[in-house]
Image: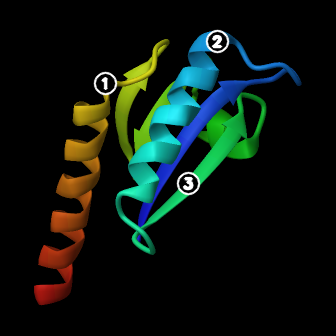
Amino acid sequence: MVWLRVFVGDGEKLAPESERALRHAEAAARRFPGLVTLEALALDAPPARERGIAIAPTVMVDDLVVAVGQAPPAGHLLRAIEAALGREGADERG
């Protein structure tokens, strides 16, 4: 399982770039049904504070930061997910 996390800010209304990053992440997660868990988080949530994330949007695939301050290009995000899935498969094979 790969974690796709989008840190979107603190307010109720998302900034346009955070909305765009979240849409890209949702589309990417749909390409890998059952393999990607998508999580949208505020900047004041514990996972953001633990990682020192203070800029929205920040997009992470597992522990890899894919984009900060802007939505990642769709292809870049897909390749990061594919790489994470490949690493996961390699770990399982030993």
Q: Quadrant of residue 73?
A: top left
Q: Position of residue 8 (x, y in %)?
A: 66, 27
Amino acid type of the residue tagged 2 in the rendering: Pro
The residue labelled by disc 1 is 73
C-alpha gap between disc 2 and disc 3: 19 Å
* Amino acid carrying mark 1 in the image: Pro
Q: Is residue 40 above or below residue 29?
A: above
Dot 2 crowding, Cα within 10 Å, few <14, some 14–19, many 20+: few
Circles 2, 1 touching at the beta carbon (< 8 Å): no
- Spatial separation of the CA atoms under disc 1 and disc 3: 17 Å
Q: Nearer the viewer, residue 57 or 17?
A: 17
Type of the residue with mark 3: Leu
Precedes in sequence: disc 1 or disc 3: 3
Q: Secondary structure at mark 2?
A: helix
Label 1 crowding class (10 Å Cα cut-off): few <14, some 14-19, many 20+? few
The x, y position of residue 57, in whole percent, is 56, 21
Query: Label 3's element?
Result: strand
User: In this rendering, would 9 be left or right of 31?
Assistant: right
Question: What residue would you read off at disc 2?
Answer: 16
> In the picture, which quadrant includes the C terminus?
bottom left
* Cα separation between marks 2 and 1: 15 Å
Q: Nearer the viewer, residue 36 or 23?
A: 23
Please name the residue shown 21% across and 56% down the image.
Answer: 82
Q: Which SS class for mark 1?
A: loop
Report the residue marked by disc 3.
38
Is 46 left or right of 72, judged from the image as shown? Answer: right
x then y, percent, for residue 90: 12, 75
